Image (cartoon, rainbow, N blue to C red):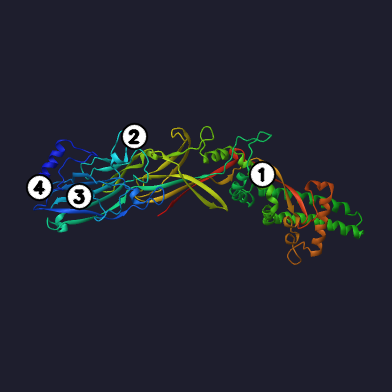
Amino acid sequence: MVRIYTLLYIYTFFALGAFCSCEPEAIDDGRDMRPIEGTYVIDYTFEGTRTSTRSIHQDQPANQRISSLTYLLYGKDGKSKESMLLKRREIPDISKDTKWPLKRETMTWGQREALKDTLEQGMDYKVVFVANIDSSIVKWTADGTPNGTLWCPLREAESFSTAYLQLPARPFTDSDMFYLFTTSVNGADKEADRDHPYNCPVLLQRVVTRTDFFTERLPEWDMTIKDTEGKVVIPDTVKTYFQPTLIPLYSKLIMGGTDAHIFNSAKGSTTDLLKKMEEAFSAEQKKWTPTDPSKTDSVKTAAKYGKYAGGMLTISRNLDQDPTPIISVLSSKHVIPLVRSLLETSLRNDSIQTLWKQSWRMGADHKTPTTQAEVVYDSGSGVDRIFLDRTAKAGLSTSARMPVDTTYISELQGFSHRFEGFSLISYGLPGQNKIMAINWYASDGTTLDHTLTQPLQTNQGGNEWYQVTYRPIYSLDCLGNANPISVEMVCDINTLLPLREMLPKVGEGTPAWTDEEVVDLRAAMIELLKADAFKAYKYAPAGDGTGETITLPVGVPDLSADDALQINSEWKVEKHR
């Protein structure tokens, strides 16, 4: 008799067009009936719930994450091809006072009654529990606004194979993410009858996945403050913060190769100095060369200067083969003016300043920070439907707008870097959710502040947690068309020109240089540097803790022009667990 009743219900269901609804079906669920022959009682108990992960904010207990609980029963007999919706029931008394997991001894009377049912033996059922879809409690609306029309996320629920959870139009919070449990039940398999109830354990599992998006917030910089020349004032805090970003670029500029603009300039200045010295020594050689070879003293002096001139050529060739002395000078304490020049010009680059302002998410008035963000998907690849069998489908172009309300501090390169962002709670499906851009909005939630365009894909599945970290200015590259700015660099002479290492010793090559000859050559070079013809090199004798120095002009790339600087951002994707 019960079997006939069930089949009659299914027929009537379709005849009346009772399709997807979040309202309980007006069907006698049999809770008040004693089990009759051919039926059995099923008791649902929540012996465990996986509700402790994927929260937006940490340490949210389960009773704050489950706001409503819906029971769905699908069934088919041996002749039916589809499991059709037989019953829908809201479990009562779900609130912040609910003790999870739900056990018989801690349930309310209403919950104990709602969490049992009478089923037919031999009939195949699909038992479903879904948390947080009751719009009368969670207040889901069709357009995602607080005052919109109430709307149910459970769609096309008349059949188990068609029923799915639609991604809502507003972002999830910790108290309304979807949890799902499904299982197949057949009393014959469970050896259940009217005298032997079946206890069905229920384990709710979250069906959403979490992706945290963080962007680096650079130090405060009010670019409306100008100096007497009308240039934007760069605070010391900005320079200090930005300097570690420049160090890798400076290393590339001094280490040789096609990008070594500073090295090439310093090498050119050193070669020019050596050539001038070679010319000066050659002039002395010519001066001392006698017309009468019998004047041996003059011959010896001329030969000495000739060897000095040849030594300059040898040193220059050695620098071509081994530029270590030049790199050593460019890595010394005297390079501060070079780094300072790079720092000043790069921070005056329009693109750098734009990224800096964006990191503060400034609104049109440059004072109001944005507080919302949305994710844009490529070709509608955002996953927006998850079916009761946990398969998912994509069709979403843009996510709901989410509050930017999360901050963390990371120690990078010896500095505390602040990152701010949001948590995207969505459905996971590897191969989908192809992110194309992220839009950042002003505090009114409607004014677009700026867009970060970046193809990105985490390939997350369901109930996973990933983090995407964006650093707008991760590294820099100097482009070849950067104009040089001449900067004076102080050089330790012994570091720049280690003569003993650069001239062959006796037995190592020709012409060989004795230690005494090297000492004499150095003295002769110092005398040249003191002369008016070499005044531009600003020779300085040794002082307290310093050796003798000269000053060389070095061309440092002017990075203030956009076509002189390539800015490389970083998008780092990590899986939490």
- Which amino acid type is marked by label 1? Ser
Q: Which residue is mark 4?
A: 2
Quadrant in which residue 426 is drawn: top left
Q: List the single residue furthest toward the left.
A: 1
- Which amino acid type is marked by label 3? Glu
Picture mark count: 4
Quadrant in which residue 139 is drawn: top left
Please report whichever mark, 4 or 3, sits nearer to the chain's N-terminal start. 4
How far from the left and from the top, in percent, is residue 521? 81, 58
- Which amino acid type is marked by label 2? Asp
Marks 2/3: CA–CA distance = 35 Å
Q: Is residue 123 visible?
A: no
Please report whichever mark, 2 or 4, sits nearer to the chain's N-terminal start. 4
- The one nearer the camera, 458 or 326, is 458
Q: Secondary structure at mark 4?
A: helix
Q: Which residue is mark 2?
A: 143
Q: Is residue 560 left or right of residue 184?
A: right
Label ID, residue 341: 1
Please report whichever mark, 3 or 1, sits nearer to the chain's N-terminal start. 3
Marks 3/1: CA–CA distance = 77 Å
- The one nearer the camera, 159 or 173, is 173
Q: Nearest to the eye among marks 1 and 2: give it.
A: 2
